[in-house]
Amino acid sequence: MPQVHFRFYAELNDFLKVGQHHKRFTIDLDRRTSIKDLIESLGVPHTEVEVILVNGHSVDFSYIVKDNDDISVYPVFETVDITPLLKLRSQPLRTMHFVLDCHLGRLARYLRQLGFDTLYRNDYDDETLAQISAKEHRILLTRDRSLLKRSIITHGYFVRESDPRKQLDEVLNRFDLKNSITPFGRCTRCNGIVVPVDKETIDDQLEPKTRKYFDTFWQCSECKQIYWEGSHVDKMHELNLEVMQ
Ligand SMILES: [Zn+2]
């Protein structure tokens, strides 16, 4: 039976079976298959892959695997210049707009607090998430590996951590976002852009105590939610300081 040899690099090993980590291994080729399907059959979503070398030459996802191919698979490089190699995506992955899977609600709030454009609803189904990611060039964040195997999704990332606060650090590091933080840039409720607003403009909407004790206000340009110094804004500042440490 035809065989091919694989080696996966860096964090792509997270997805492989024990015994395949960080070393060359051989598998049987029991069918005619594209390299995309073969890589995903080993558990690695194509969205995690940036460069594939076959016998030293870079190929795209449609490459049909042949007997005795020697295949090296590399993850998305955020900092290394790979311009001499064939990139698998025409759109840069650095477009920092996100859409989050339903189980990542807390992470969505954190990202919004730091000003990142983050679409999230707890009732988006897989098809909707995939469509939004593709049409709006949003990076899909999910802990559902099978969702990332959909061909339509070019920009996706499998979130490793399960704790929301650790997920935030993971995403900030992975996409090198720390210099792009705009504290309090987005409404945590709806992702609308938050802008400063004069107290007089919203005076009639304030509770008596809020009116008495606070003078600086912001408002969501979409859902009109009002924010002021105090719990919301303090939490945001704390988060910002924390992640910048
Ligand atoms: Zn809003």
Image (cartoon, helix red, strand yellow):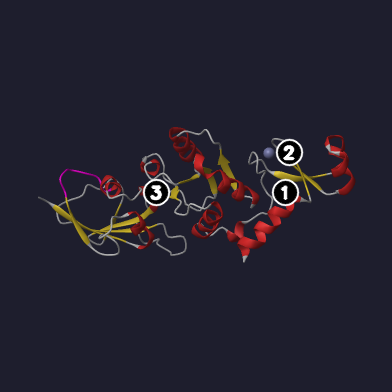
Q: x and y percent of residue 72 in the render? A: 28, 60
- Numbered disc 2: secondary structure: loop
Mark 1 burial class by Cα count in 10 Å: few <14, some 14-19, many 20+ = some
Residue under numbered circle 3: 47
Disc 2 versus disc 1: nearer the observer? 1
Q: Which mark is residue 225?
A: 2
- Amino acid type indicated by mark 2: Gln
Which residue occupies 46% across, 48% down?
A: 91
Q: x and y percent of residue 16 in the render? A: 30, 55
- Amino acid type indicated by mark 3: Thr
Which image quadrant is residue 73 in? bottom left
Describe residue 25's horizontal placement relative to residue 183 as left or right: left
In magenta stretch: residue 75? no
Disc 3 versus disc 1: nearer the observer? 1
Q: Where 183 falls versus 193 (above or below)?
A: below
- Numbered disc 3: secondary structure: helix
- Measure how far apart labels 3 and 2 are at the Cα level: 36 Å
Q: x and y percent of residue 80 in the render? A: 43, 65
Hey, which residue is sitting farthest bottom in the picture? 245
- Amino acid type indicated by mark 1: His
- Give the mark, 3 or 1, whose residue is nearer the N terminus: 3
Describe residue 6's horizontal placement relative to residue 149 as left or right: left
Q: Which residues are magenta?
A: 29-35
Q: Which mark is residue 195?
A: none
